[in-house]
Image: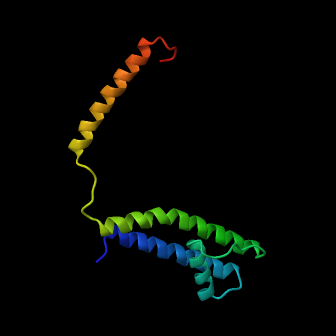
Amino acid sequence: MFSRRLRWSLFGLIACVFGLAVTSWLTTDDDLVHATYLTLLDLFAIDAPALGEPLRRQIIQLLSGLAGLLLLPVMAAAVLRAWAPSVSRPPCAAHRAVCPGMSSFWASARSGVRGTGIKGA
């Protein structure tokens, strides 16, 4: 039903949540369900800052927020790729046609700058 990339992205998200929830459960006095709930809130940056909490909780919150920031573009790309499979990269011929045009443009611009006598050009 889902593409392979989307499944791997979801697997990565679930593994990250599980790892952070277990770490939170082992380092704090919360039960596993509450630790998972807090981890999900922290991962999506919904939870309030852990000011006044123990240092272990603050570190877990920072790690969860960082993981959320790292996983956001991966999940967004996987979802977009799954929902729009027909949108793909341009064909190689289009890329080859653009590059020579740009290189000739830069070559002529560079020779024009050299003709002005500017040092370092």
Q: Is residue 117 above or below residue 99?
A: above
The correct choice, above or below, for 80 with respect to 15 in the image is: above
Residue at the (34%, 21%) spot, across then down:
108
Quarter of the figure that contains the N terminus:
bottom left
- Tell which of 19 and 105 is nearer to you: 105
Q: Residue at x 56, y 78 (%)?
A: 40
Question: Which residue sits at x=32%, y=32%?
Answer: 102
Please state the horizontal and vertical placement of residue 17, each as a whole percent of the image: 54, 76
Q: Quadrant of residue 75?
A: bottom left
- Tell me which corner region of the image, top left, top right, bottom left or bottom right, holds residue 78: bottom left
Instruction: State the colouring used for the structure image.
Output: rainbow
> In screen coordinates, is 103 left or right of 61?
left
Of residue 7 and residue 99, the one placed in the foreground of this image is 99
Compared to residue 59, the image places residue 18 above or below, namely below
Q: In this figure, what is the number of numbered marks? A: 0
Q: Nearer the viewer, residue 56 or 121?
A: 121
Instruction: Give the x, y percent position of residue 59.
Output: 69, 69
Horizontal relation, residue 27 to residue 117: left or right: right
Vertical arrangement, residue 88 with respect to residue 13, above or below? above
